[in-house]
Amino acid sequence: GALASERGVTVGCLVELNVGQNRCGVDSAEEVLALAQHVAGVEGLRFCGVQGYQGACQHERSAAARAQISQQVAAQLRAACDMLTAADLKPEIVTGGGTGSFVHDVAAGVLTEVQPGSYLFMDVDYGANEEGFSLFQPALFVLSTVISARPTRVVLDAGLKSHSIESGLPRVLDGPLAGCAVRNGGDEHMVVDLGADAPAAARALRPG
């Protein structure tokens, strides 16, 4: 606050409420109010609102489970907002939500903005949610080449240096290998296993 004041600027601040992510934020509506009051009393700072982000629910596979979590988050945020409003600190901004829960977050009617980000490109893990890719389609892909073809597998030149596996292995979404099982082949390779039901076009692939 002192630095902002010295430079003649005012910094807007959000108070984060821990709504189940157990990462950052204070743990109760009372603590939200106390911190907001502190911010409001510091020259160079301005209390703007509350953040409550529940990232852990974004990849809950069941839409019903995500809706339930979203309702719980909304109740926590509503309690904090009511307490702030009663203390003449009505929040201008109430922010939260994400790609996996934004439909339910908006329906709860507490947030003034939602924070989806992954929707821009989407990924395989979001595609595994109950809705699949019905709301947003993948928009970023890795183009790879067959570098080895055997009767039971095809090897592509796209390994860990080409894609992440922190949320699971990639999928082949198009072409004759679509739907075939994929396994990690190291930094430069991805192995696609050709099961008994693999199409003839997959078995006909050749390097290049």
Image (cartoon, rainbow, N blue to C red):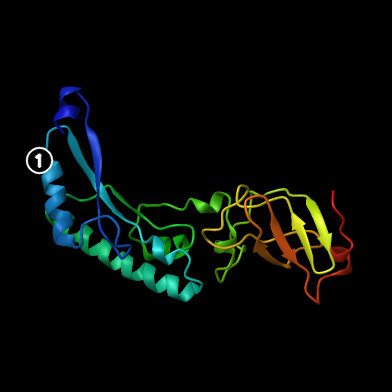
Residue 5 point in image, percent of width and height? 16, 27
Of residue 19 and residue 93, the one placed in the foreground of this image is: 19
Residue occupying image coordinates x 32% and y 66%: 73
Residue 46 point in image, percent of width and height? 20, 39
Residue occupying image coordinates x 42% and y 71%: 67
Label 1 SS: loop
Determine whether, in the image, residue 23 is placed left or right of residue 158: left
Determine whether, in the image, residue 1 is placed left or right of residue 119: left
Number of marks present in the image shown:
1
Residue 144 point in image, percent of width and height? 74, 49
Of residue 59 and residue 108, the one placed in the foreground of this image is: 59
Residue occupying image coordinates x 86% and y 59%: 205
Q: Residue furthest top?
A: 7
Within-10-Å neighbours for mark 1: few <14, some 14–19, many 20+: few
Q: Using the image, determine if residue 93 lies above or below residue 149.
A: above
Residue 28 point in image, percent of width and height? 18, 63
Mark 1 highlights which residue?
41
Residue occupying image coordinates x 83% and y 59%: 149
Let me know if residue 88 appears in the view: no
Image quadrant for the N terminus? top left
Determine whether, in the image, residue 65 is placed left or right of residue 91: right
Q: Amino acid at mark 1?
A: Gly
